[in-house]
Structures are given as structure tokens and as C-alpha cells.
Amino acid sequence: MRVRVTVPATSANLGSGFDCLAMALDLRNEVEAALSDRPRVEVAGEGEDVLPRDERNTVYRAAQALAARAGVRDVAFAFRCLNRIPLDRGLGSSAAARVAGIAAANRLLGSPLPPADLVRLSAELEGHPDNVVAAWVGGVTVAVRDGEGGVCWQRVLPERFPSVVLCVPELRVPTGEARARLPAQVSLQDAVFNTGRAALLVAALYNGDFGALAVATQDRLHQPYRELLVPGFADAVAAAREAGAWGAALSGAGSSLVAFCPADCAESVGEAMRTALARYGVHSRWRVSSVDVRGTVVEDAPGGETWDG
């Protein structure tokens, strides 16, 4: 038996929604998997020169965690990974790897765990639920821990989404390094600032009032501390706004930027961000993207289905 899993990239935080908001994007990793007599991992695409090709690979480790949670011992997997999501750019590459490994292993082992347990395990491995929930179900998601080890989440699926422009610098920002920049405590004023804007962001997307994203993407919890890791970040956000974007923010922990804009100015927004970063010696590329609403897709041979949570 062989399975094929595709998982979307994700952009978390979206400015004000630190560790709780995320958006799935139309950039997908592909993984083919099967049970095997010994561990095997092949990697092509993004990270092929640095990612391990044995049991240390994140996809494989996630599959092992699924098997352990399901009580299955002495099992090995073979994975063939085609990575399109850049590493350490704030686009959910680690979440995609973990979700792919868990989804593949669960199907290969006869689906011993229900969807809620798959999300829970993914969040445990990732350390927070925002990226993994968006990767599983697609769309824009709000995800929080429920206080009992589980994850409570909702998906936002309005009639339309704004165009999304990603600007991806040739600059890796490991999540651990980005988290080390954050303060242990924040002021009540900053907490209130972000709480209101996170709620505004969800309402603006749901209602299609994209002009409110100019305020809704503002943040005081993580971007002020992380923007020094991306030289030119503030100027790139300003340039995106001047080119017609409703709002722009750091994608996840960085280094990528995500901008929301009308379709007719998407290319201008991308080029504006690229040019702004170039002034600081940061080379980047940009792409016009869209919100992925499929989430993780698991296929057997033949046929397939969408994992719908």
C-alpha cells in the first residue's frame, strides 16, 4: 500500500494574531509513503541539501510519533518528499512536515487515530497549534489550546479572500532564534492593543471589509522584537502599503512578509517589497498567492479524499 499526501504552506500570526491565527496558502509539499522493511527517506526540492535522509527527518519522526501514540511497534516507513515550502522563512515548513508524516502514517496503519487526536499530536510536536491546524483544514484558522491538552479551533471561510503576496527573502530565520527575541512579559496596554486587532482581523476577513486590514495587521507582541532579524522589514511594509496593499506583516516568525491587496496591484506590491529589501542588501523573490481551502489531502491508489477534520 502506498499513500500520497499534500500539505499547504501556512502563514501564521498575520500581524496581530500571535500564536493563534494562521492562513493556508496555495504552495504545497508532496509526500509519498509506504510501510517498509527499514527506514527510508528521499528529499527533493527545498532543503534537499540540508535535510536528513533517515529517522532524524521531521516527516519520519512525526510518523514514528503517530505509530507510538497508536501503540504500534516495530514499524518502519519509506518516504519520498518533494518540498516546495522554503525552510525557516515563516511559511510553516516544519508544520507541513509534521502533518505530512502523521497523515501518511495514520492512513498506512489503518487510521487508528481520529482527526482530533491527529491535530492534538501535531500541535504537541510543533509546540503551538496555529500552523498545524491551518495545514490540516485550510482557509484562515483560529486555534488555541483548550487547557486540557487538546486544541479548540475554528475555520474562517468567507465568500472571497483578498489577494495574497508573499515576499520571501534569501534569509533564514530559525523559529528558535525568533522566539528567543520575545520578552517574557508584555504590558496590559500592548495585550489589549493586539487582542482588539486580532478580533478585527477575523471580522474583516469574514465580512470582506479588507480596508480594515491596515489596522488589523498591526502588532506589538512579536514584530517589534523580530523585525531586526529582517533588515528593511519596516520599509518593505510601508512600500507595500504605498503600492496599494491593505496591510502587510511578518509571516510567522519570518523572514517572509505577507501582504493583502486587491488583485490588480498584487504585482506592484510584490515588486515594492522586493525593492525595499534590496536597499538593505537583502535579496528576495515574491509570488502572488491565494488562500488554500483544501488543507491536507491524503490519497490512496487509486482515488483520494480531503482530510476535513
Image (cartoon, helix red, strand yellow):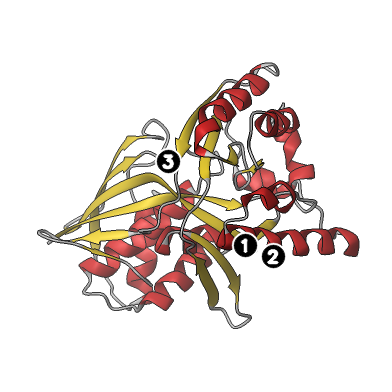
Q: For mark 3, does the 10 Å Cα neighbourhood hold few (<14), some (14 to 19), or many (20 or more) residues?
A: many
* Disc ID at residue 85: 3
* Disc ID at residue 199: 2
Name the quarter where the N terminus is drawn: bottom left
* Disc ID at residue 202: 1
Q: Amino acid at mark 2?
A: Ala
Q: Nearer the viewer, residue 148 or 192?
A: 192
Q: Are marks 2 and 1 in contact (CB under 8 Å)?
A: yes
User: Regarding mark 1 in the picture, which secondary structure is present there?
Assistant: helix
Disc 2 versus disc 3: distance between alpha carbons? Answer: 28 Å
User: Regarding mark 2 in the picture, which secondary structure is present there?
Assistant: helix
Q: Amino acid at mark 3?
A: Ile
The residue located at (68%, 57%) in the rendering is 18
What percent of the width, then of the height, locates residue 99?
Answer: 39, 59
Q: Mark 1 or mark 3, which is nearer the start of the sequence? A: 3
The residue located at (50%, 37%) in the rendering is 263
What percent of the width, then of the height, locates residue 123?
Answer: 51, 66
Q: Amino acid at mark 1?
A: Val
What percent of the width, then of the height, locates residue 53?
Answer: 33, 42
User: Regarding mark 3 in the picture, which secondary structure is present there?
Assistant: loop
What percent of the width, then of the height, locates residue 133?
Answer: 48, 64
The residue located at (58%, 53%) in the rendering is 12
Q: Nearer the viewer, residue 169 or 50?
A: 169
